Amino acid sequence: MIDRIEHMFSVVANGAHGSVWTVLFIGFVFGAIILYSRLDKFEKMAGFMIFEDTLVPRMAMTTVALSSIGFYFMVQSGYATFDIKPTLLGGLVIGGILFGMGLVILGKCPSAFFVSVSEGRVDALVGVIGGMFGGLVFTIAYPWIEKIMGPDLGKIRVPDFFAEHGLLTVVIFSTVLLIVAFLIPTIDYKDPADFKEK
Amino acid sequence: MPKQIPWWLGGLLMSLLFYYTFSVWGANRPIGASTGMAYFSNLIFDLDTEHYEYASKIEIAGAWEGVMLIGAFFGGLFMSIFVTKTFHISYIPTLWKERKNRSVLSRMIWSFIAGFLLVFGARLAGGCNAGHILSGGSQLAVSGMIFAVVALGTGMITGRFFYKRKVIKDD
């Protein structure tokens, strides 16, 4: 296993997507933001889907609204390239359903449960172990699973349908998200466990 | 130091990180996490790239996300120990106690099942919250939007049946 971990770092070091330190730094900041905004908490993620908390949709909408504008200009000026996931309809729908069920029960997504473990949450660790088995079954069964993942509609983006109004589409999309994020009422589930006097 | 940052600041900081990661100065690729989880699982169960098609498929992207997740773990650890000071061993979330039950065993069994569904579902769909909803949404990808609607919709419906109704407090 040690050699495979070394191999993982060497793949990143030889890849074209930043040095190992860059990637670790990105992860560090990512984890720090997730924890500091409390996205890793069950009360935030599951709470959003059972209407006890509104942090997740507001924060996600703000991120997507700001990023979509920035990404557009970065790609236009050649400082980035779009990296779109293919629209595999079967996989998206079946996967989305399973993922949604898991999300509301565990209350953390696949990056947040990792961060959650770092806060001492044993249930998140059990979730990670469950996830390891999920990955195991997926890798072994991939030759069969592959058949139900289609049809592949290609790597499509919304602006593809409005070819001449690329910027306008992005601006409208971003503005709508920002407005909705501001209009969603603040519901904050204050977890007594976090505010205990030590 | 405050124990929590508000949603707009979280969103702003997250988008700055996304700019950096997405640009040629950073990693020149969007952030994703679930490929990294599948990569870890191949690593732990020693599924090699020669015998398993999927393992070779995610060889490059999985390694990147794996290293990123190691960073994320330490980022979370740093914040929970030094800034929010919320690090403590816990078994059941408060809201679960309120809306489901107080049994540790039940929470653990459901956590295992849910973790399984999360990674399996994310691999089937080709991404998770980070890769599909945040990164995909920011690029206005159709796949990300379909995923967001299906996953969050299913989550809300499941939540409605899985948890008990909200208890109205009279205070």
Image (spheres, helix red, strand yellow):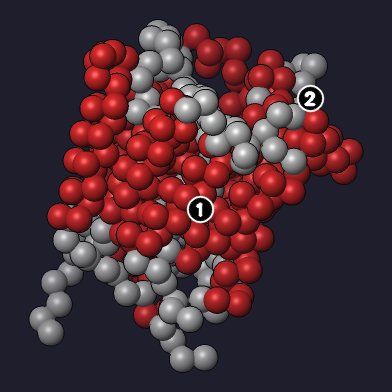
Q: Nearer the viewer, residue B162 or B105?
A: B162
The reply, left or right, for residue A30 in relation to residue A103 is right
The reply, left or right, for residue A193 in relation to residue B21 is left
Q: Position of residue A60 (x, y in %)?
A: 35, 48
Label 2: how many Cα within 10 Å (few below 14, some 14–19, many 20+): some
Q: Quadrant of the C terminus of chain B?
A: bottom left
Return the mark for residue B48. Answer: 2
Residue position marked by numbered label 1 in the rendering: A112
Q: Residue furthest right?
A: A3
Is A36 located above or below residue B138 in the figure? below
**Residue A172 seen by the camera:** yes
Return the mark for residue A87. Answer: none
**Residue in the image at 52% along x and 91% along y:** A198
Q: Position of residue B99 (x, y in %)?
A: 29, 64
Q: Nearer the viewer, residue A99 or B108?
A: A99
Is A150 located above or below residue A109 in the figure? above
Specify the amino acid type for callout 1.
Ala
Q: Position of residue A38 (x, y in %)?
A: 43, 64
Specify the amino acid type for callout 2.
Asp
The reply, left or right, for residue A133 in relation to residue B124 is right
**Residue A135 seen by the camera:** no
Is the same chain shared between marks 1 and 2?
no
